[in-house]
Amino acid sequence: MDIRFEEKEAEQLKKLDEIINKYKDEEGMLIRILQKSQEIFGYLPMKVQAYISESLNIPISTINGVVSFYSLFSQEPQGKYTIGVCMGTACYVKGAQDVLDTIKEELQIDVGQTTMDQLFTLKATRCIGACGLAPVITINEDVHGRLSPADVPGILYQYIKTNKESQLNN
């Protein structure tokens, strides 16, 4: 199989080769290699899966089966900020669906999608264990609780503003 990568991906491939060489002889190495690969590329596109398949001499179907089975892996580019809307019972009863619908409307994306500017990825999650704060969303590691749909634009704006400020400082 001829796997084509762009020039800018050469540095990423070099790091991937280092990871494959480091872990290839370990028991259960595939998950670790896939995790590290996702850290490098941001997600696991089919060409990265094919490269790992060739490098490890593991069928592509096996690689893709693992990637598609585990929710921690993504085959699509992810946003800088991942928004997880808790859809557990307590959150759902207290209005999580309305919060989710408002986020979808504000960002013009659906669950599982990423905004065109690659800033936000939206996910519906199971219970995150913050039932006393229901309804709850997480944005990366930040938890926002006791939300109403009216809170959503202000929260999103905080992250948009932070992103713009960090771009100006770099």
Image (cartoon, grey):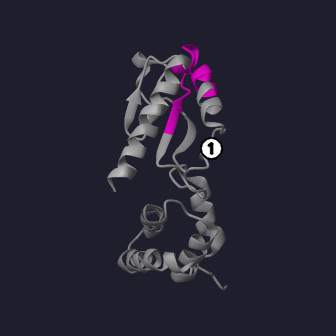
Task: Pinpoint residue 108: horizontal percent, then vertical percent.
Answer: 66, 37
Q: Residue at x 50, y 75 (%)?
A: 9
Q: Read off the magenta span.
A: 83-101
Identify the residue at horizontal 42%, vertical 45% (top origin). Answer: 164
Q: Name the residue under label 1.
A: 112
Residue at image coords 63%, 75%: 59
Q: Which of the 4 image quadrants contains residue 162?
A: top left
Residue 87 screen position, x and y as percent = 56, 27
* Numbered disc total: 1
Q: Quadrant of the N terminus?
A: bottom right
| Residue 57 vs residue 13, the one in the foreground | 13
Mark 1 crowdedness (10 Å alpha carbons): few <14, some 14-19, many ≥20: few
- Vertical position of residue 47 compared to residue 165: above or below: below
Question: Could you tell me which secondary element the residue under label 1 belongs to?
Answer: loop
Provide residue 93's location: percent of width, then percent of height: 57, 14
Foreground pick, 144 / 26: 144
Any magenta on residue 90?
yes
Q: Which residue shows up at 37% across the image and 51% down it?
A: 168
* Residue 31 or residue 77, whichever sits in front: 77
Task: Single out the residue that lies furthest toward the bottom.
Answer: 2
**Callout 1 amino acid:** Gly
Residue, far top: 94
| Residue 168, above or below 152 | below
The image shows residue 110 at horizontal and vertical percentages of: 66, 38
Quarter of the rendering occupied by the C terminus: bottom left
Q: Magenta segment: does it hold 86?
A: yes
